[in-house]
Amino acid sequence: MAVLWLVLLLALPVFFLGAFVWAVFEHFLTADLPATKLRALHCIFLYLWEFCSMPKFVRFLHDSMRIKKDPELMVTNLHFGMIPVRLFQPKAASSRLWRGIIFYQGGGSVFGSLDCYHGLCNLLAQETDSVFVMIGYRMVPDHHSPAIFHDCLNTSIYFLKVLETYGVDPSRVVVCVESIGGAVAATITQVLIYLLVQVFCLQLPSFQQNENVPFLSWKFVVTTLCNYLAIDLSWRDAILNGSCVPPEVWRNPGNVPKKFKKRGFQPWPPGPFNEAACLETKHMLDVENSSLLADDDVIAQLPEAFLVCCENDILRDDSLLYKKRLEDQGVRVTWYHLEEGFHGSLIFFDKKALSFLCSLKIVNAVVNYVKGM
């Protein structure tokens, strides 16, 4: 028995070391990283992900983060219907009704939690002097599309019906979303941070240029997309080459400005149309999953929008295409582009040694825009 325990004790560190070496090896061969700090952070992320590829475990790590109390805000955990929300309210008295902000977090329906985004939402509530609602929508793997869409929409409607209870001005309500939240809410929202508005064209310039940039690689996007939409991974190649998309729906990258095509882009026409693949993946084209396909009359009724776009982001061109759709329909757009930015950078704004300048720039840009409305 003693020998068995000795073998186990020796095997565990060897296993951990092997997993770490593999993660670093894979990282240096495939990852395209714009910053030294991001390189180190990506090594840690890969190690954790490859060792324990369980979304629930990552959420457990998120929820174990220490939450700092803000003496200027009253924070309350509630349920709007069946959906958990976190409400941030200024403690100070006000002679006028408050601004209201509804926030849909990113994370690809895999990562993120109310605790994970607490610091960000706390700051936004304080700096914009707003009543702030963060929605804890249901996630993969227990729930799939359209759960997020319904959770965010129904919770937003609930909040809009009780604005008076929280002293919120109905004319000053802002919807703010990050990443996959854009797919959920681009048809009603005003502030979109590196948004996802289409899932049917994965050959845009930004997909090719940033396919290995963390924290949103090409492979991870497709895998997450299939999980979220409950699509079998056997259809992954059809999704990648666009053969599952009917010719009349296909969008070429012609609307992406030329200056964004200079860095390693090769036009790639869609593969031959595959009707079987189309039938299995057709819900990708539903407006709640690809709001870029919304009718013109719907787009034309949207309020003015603030779009945050990062150069080192696989979803960069989603912002560019959506910007053009809005402008073509006469919707006013404020566009904020960060050359040094990358997907997911926002969540690191308050992580001290792991924070990035681009994270702070995004936060400041959002605060300034909201305060100027």
Image: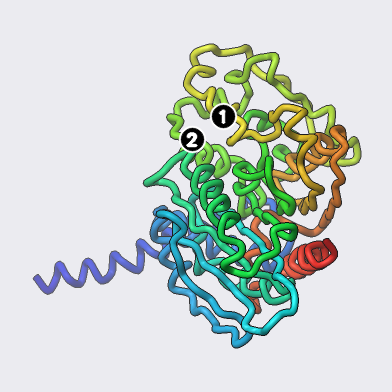
Residue 293: x %, y % from top left: 69, 29
Q: Residues within 10 Å of mark 2 (few under 14, many from 20)?
A: some
Residue 280: x %, y % from top left: 47, 21
Q: Whole-Å distance between the Cαs marked 1 and 2?
A: 7 Å
Whichever of callouts 1 and 2 sits on the residue coming sooner in the sequence is 2
Task: Please say if 213 is above or below 17.
Answer: above
Residue 31: x %, y % from top left: 64, 51
Task: Please say if 180 is above or below 254.
Answer: below
- Disc 1 marks which amino acid? Met
Residue on which the image places disc 1: 284
Task: Please say if 112 is above or below 142.
Answer: below
Residue on which the image places disc 2: 229
> In this view of the protein, which residue sits in the foreground, 307 or 174?
174
Which quadrant would residue 160 be assigned to in this image? Answer: bottom right
Residue 355: x %, y % from top left: 68, 72
- Disc 2 marks which amino acid? Leu
Which quadrant would residue 241 be assigned to in this image? Answer: top right
Q: What residue appears at the point 55 percent right and 44 percent down from the top-left corner?
A: 220
